[in-house]
Amino acid sequence: MTKMSGAKALIESLDRQNVEVIFGIVGGATLPVYDVLCKSKIRHIHCRHEQGAAHAADGYARASGKAGVCIATSGPGATNLVTGIANAYLDSSPIIALTGQVCTTSANTSYMIGRDAFQEADIIGITTPITKHNYQLQGAAEIPKTVKTAFYIATTGRPGPVLIDIPKDTQTEVTEIEFSDKIVIRGYKPTFNPHPLQIRKAAELLAKAEKPVILAGGGVITSNASPELLQTAELLMAPVATTFMGKGAFPENHPLSLGSIGMHGNPVANKLLCETDVLLAIGTRFSDRATGNLDSFCSAAKKIHIDIDTAEIGKNIEADIPIVADAKKALNALHKRLAKQLKKKEKSAWIKRVKEAKEQLNPPSKGESKDLKPKALLQQLRKLLPEDAIITTEVGQNQMWAALYFNALKPRTFISSGGLGTMGFGFPAAIGAKVACPDRSVVDIAGDGSFRMTEQELATSVMEDIPVTVIVLNNSVLGMVAQWQRMFFKKRYTAVELGSVPDFVKLAEAYGAQGFHVESIAEFSKAVQKALKSNVTTVIDVPISSEEDVVPMVPPGCGINEQVGEY
Amino acid sequence: MENGRTKVIAALVENKPGVLHSIANMFRRRGFNIESITVGHTEQKGLARMTITVKGDERIVEQVIKQMHKLIDVVKVSGLEPENIVARELVLVKVNVPDTKTRSDVINCVEVFRGRVVDVSSGTLTLEITGTPDKIDAFLNLMKTYGIMELARTGLTALSRGSKSIRIDE
């Protein structure tokens, strides 16, 4: 027991969780915390908008596998975090959001919770449906236990955001503080180990399968199960498709890789998923964008569904063999069991079909393209970047082109807002990823519409010395919406024109970053190479046609085998 | 279970502020309907017990239970089999009794239903009936003929029959 203030106890507790960095913006209700934070060894990264802070914490979490921490003041500071928290929730990303709050008790009774005090917002009520859990502290003595519990909840089981709301008087209260290593949460006991009987059943089914397909979701990346996935796939000689969130779980240049499934999935993945007789799905929630119309999704297949979240089993798809477990542990057990009963499988007919489908549906590009077409740009980008470079994306066409044409080769190298589809996510997430992995290149694949939603973080990246590269695929429209208006609303374009402003080169320069405008693939390559070597953030403005569609595409309501358009 | 049958869910939850909110919020967000909900302290310190009745097919009820289980403050949750529970509801009902004949008729009904008269005024009787929802419905139907002024139902509360329980070991 030591006597200290709540603010000191908070920073000490964060330090005990090995927190190295916090993304945030200071404000009235967090002043006592900042007064201690500035003297601690934890780095504070001063963002320019709280949404940017939350996304940066998210990007940090996804790149590192550790919890990302963001902080905001009460009221508008806290509500500005909301989009970032919802984004982390839908993509199961472990972030800790700290918010200041008005006092629980105060000599000035009008500055108290429930009195509509200045900058008071019910952030607990607001974030209840978008956090894994949230806490409002009632006294400084609760801080160590609450912080420890929050990190445990955020990072274990199915990860997710946890918010801690800290009233200002709790920060200033000086009391006896005890740091204990023990935490008891009687209502939270995730199941990590798979049930042996279910593993046996799954192994039997897979051993007999003639046309097995593995579908890897974001859960495989979360649990660092890529090595186990690779050895299981190679033992079974089963092709591997990923969901959008699973991109990077399996190297997309591997002969067994089918690419990602879904509305803008690789046609090979979508096609073969409809032909499989046994589907092994791991760490996926079968989102509507991934499955298309459920009636035709893997309709002929027996389904094995591994997920750590019991509620995902049977939510969208009925599983024949459900396995509630951590993906890594389950795949390990499954591989052990399978290795006992079969040597490396020779599934010649099915593997032949996989090869055939790839040749037919993913034909190699004819010659070198000189035009600034998204496919050529992204395939060129892959060639320019090291294998371990981290890609983040914005949301919309840029994101789907990246999903289709940029091969992710390693886990945690493709970071995107899959569930919430948050425009403006990619750039601050890139900043967070760069902080987590300072020695690696980080590139945000952006559209001009999305980038503008959080471009103010250019100030953060320049002032905090966090150099990243932003590639703006600039079509001067909100491209994905324009595409839907073109395809489904008879070209009645409404509210999608962005015009030719701003000049992205000048915008970058205004913030002290560097900007390049390119007109050809050759110039693009040069600009990327310069950016990768640069120690300042670079924005590359790449003009593309506003008429360009993301195809192939599964029209809404159709099955994933009813894709239209050429790859 | 056939479509739309009522299912009883029992849960042990942390007895602290905000828990009811997070549970109600989850029901709203996921589009589940609560038919009734009752909450009270239990024999175990810091735990409250909720009895929630929901309507839906087996898949929906299973999702409700799983989604409740995900909430950190829900310590234990279980679907109770309708055949294997004792379930009771309480109703207080105020009935118009303009004359002595009506008054004695109503009192007779209350006796048949093993209820009690808990308050009397010159023109009204306030009655208390405990039982299964069916029994209470039947009683209230009967009272309608006399004129119900006001009523308050608690919603269902239930325990498993026999030695089965959802109690947690501490």
Image: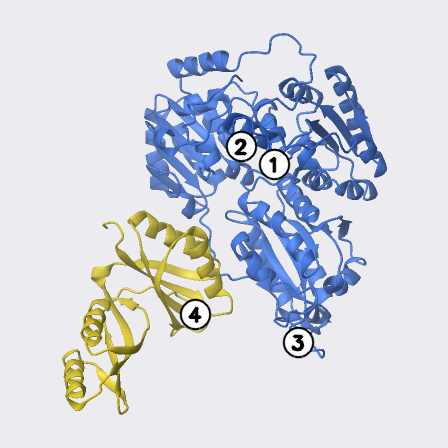
Chain colours: A blue, B yellow
Q: Amino acid at mark 3?
A: Thr
Residue located 58% across and 61% down the image? A124
- Of label 3 and label 1, which has the lower sequence position? 3
- For disc 1, the marked residue is A416
- Mark 2 touches mark 1? (CB < 8 Å): yes
- Mark 4 touches mark 2? (CB < 8 Å): no
- What SS does tag 4 mark? strand
- What SS does tag 3 mark? loop
Q: Are marks 4 and 2 on the same chain?
A: no
Estimate the spatial distance between the alpha carbons at disc 4 and disc 2, rounded to whole Å.
Answer: 41 Å
- For disc 4, the marked residue is B47
> For residue B136, what is the image quadrant?
bottom left
Name the subunit of mark 2.
A
Estimate the spatial distance between the alpha carbons at disc 4 and disc 1, rounded to whole Å.
Answer: 41 Å
- For disc 2, the marked residue is A244
Estimate the spatial distance between the alpha carbons at disc 4 and disc 3, rounded to whole Å.
Answer: 27 Å
- What SS does tag 2 mark? loop
Residue A238's label in the rendered image is none
The x, y position of residue A403, in whole percent, is 58, 27
Label 4 Cα crowd, 10 Å radius (few <14 / some 14-19 / many 20+)? many
